[in-house]
Image: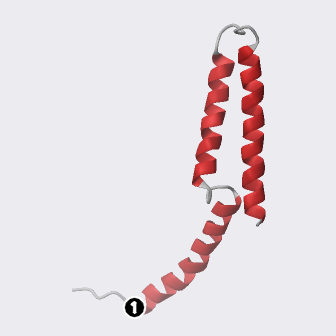
Amino acid sequence: MSRRNPTLSWRTALFLAPVLVVLFVIGCVTGRGQPHMQAALDHLQSAKAELQSAVSDKGGHRVRAIELVDRAIEQVNDGMTYAASR
């Protein structure tokens, strides 16, 4: 029967703790600490791709929708940047 070395476990924990903190901070700074804003951004980018793939201009409404989605993407990015700076 093998026994685990408790010193090794503490060493591992002492090494991993700062690594996890750094990863958490990086996640917050890059927006992953804002799951709802990141999800909104993902949906907006998907919507833009769908609009760009649509055929014909729909009387200018498709182009206008793409412009509005671009503005929304910009606002979400600005909001995430603002939140990360606080």
> Residue at left 65%, top 35%?
44
Give the image quarter of residue 65. top right
Q: Compared to 32, does 19 lie above or below?
A: below
| Left or right: 64 in relation to 38 | right
> In percent of the image, x 62 and y 67: which residue is there?
23
Q: Is residue 30 above or below residue 1?
A: above
| Image quarter hosting the N terminus | bottom left
Horizontal arrangement in the rendering, residue 56 relative to residue 10 (left or right): right
The answer to which of 65 and 25 lies nearer the viewer is 65
Count of marks placed on residues:
1
Residue sticking out furthest to the left = 1
Vertical position of residue 77 compared to residue 31: above or below: above
Q: How many other residues sit within 10 Å of disc 1, few (<14), some (14-19) or many (≥20)?
A: few
The x, y position of residue 53, in whole percent, is 65, 17
- Image coordinates of residue 12 in percent, x first then y, are 49, 82
37 and 24: which one is in front?
37
